[in-house]
């Protein structure tokens, strides 16, 4: 996926934050950065096998987090 596609698919992320996170995920072995030496320059990102293996756990965490009522979240933060 190209950087601009990622940027459009995550509406509230700043360009700086997206760059930082992609670099960290690349260092952690979750994402692979592919550079095509052409004009204009082209860079794509894809999940590594390890990154893909992590998806079910992240999906489960997202489902759990979005299923909690907002009041429960606020109360838990103040305990």
Image (spheres, grey):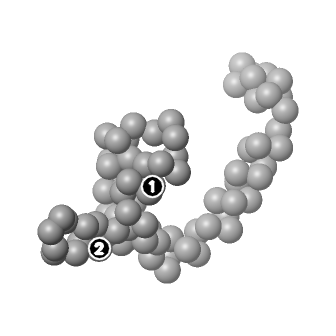
**Residue shown at the point (82%, 38%) measured from the top left:** 68
**Residue shown at the point (38%, 67%) measured from the top left:** 45
Q: CA distance from mark 1 to mark 2?
A: 14 Å
Residue 72: % across, % down: 83, 28
Q: Furthest-front residue in view? A: 39
**Secondary structure under the numbered disc 2 in the rendered image:** strand
Which sits in the foreground, 33 or 5?
A: 5
Q: Is residue 68 visible?
A: yes
Residue 27: % across, % down: 32, 63
Residue 22: % across, % down: 37, 56
Q: Furthest-bottom residue in view? A: 49
Numbered marks: total: 2
Give the side of residue 67 with respect to residue 8, left or right.
right
**Secondary structure under the numbered disc 1 in the rendered image:** helix
Residue 1: % across, % down: 43, 66
**Residue shown at the point (55%, 74%) measured from the top left:** 52
Q: Is residue 21 visible?
A: no
- Tell me the residue that label 2 is attached to: 34
**Residue shown at the point (70%, 51%) measured from the top left:** 62
Q: Examine the image and state in which quarter residue 58 appears.
A: bottom right
Q: Examine the image and state in which quarter residue 16 appears.
A: top left
Which sits in the foreground, 78 or 55?
A: 55
Q: Examine the image and state in which quarter residue 2 appears.
A: bottom left
- Tell me the residue that label 1 is attached to: 6
Task: Tell me if residue 75 comes above or below residue 44 in the rendering.
Answer: above
The reply to whether dot 1 and dot 2 touch (C-beta < 8 Å) is no
Which of the two discs, 1 and 2, labels the residue nearer the N terminus? 1
Question: 10 Å neighbourhood of mark 2: few (<14), some, or many (≥20)?
Answer: few
Return the mark for residue 67: none
């Amino acid at each position: 996926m190209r950087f601009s596609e990622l940027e459009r698919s995550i509406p509230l992320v700043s360009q700086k934050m997206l760059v930082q996170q992609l670099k960290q995920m690349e260092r952690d072995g979750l994402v692979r950065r592919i550079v095509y030496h052409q004009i204009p320059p082209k860079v794509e990102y894809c999940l590594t096998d390890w990154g893909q293996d992590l998806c079910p756990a992240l999906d489960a965490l997202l489902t759990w987090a979005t299923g909690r009522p907002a009041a429960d979240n606020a109360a838990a933060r103040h305990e």
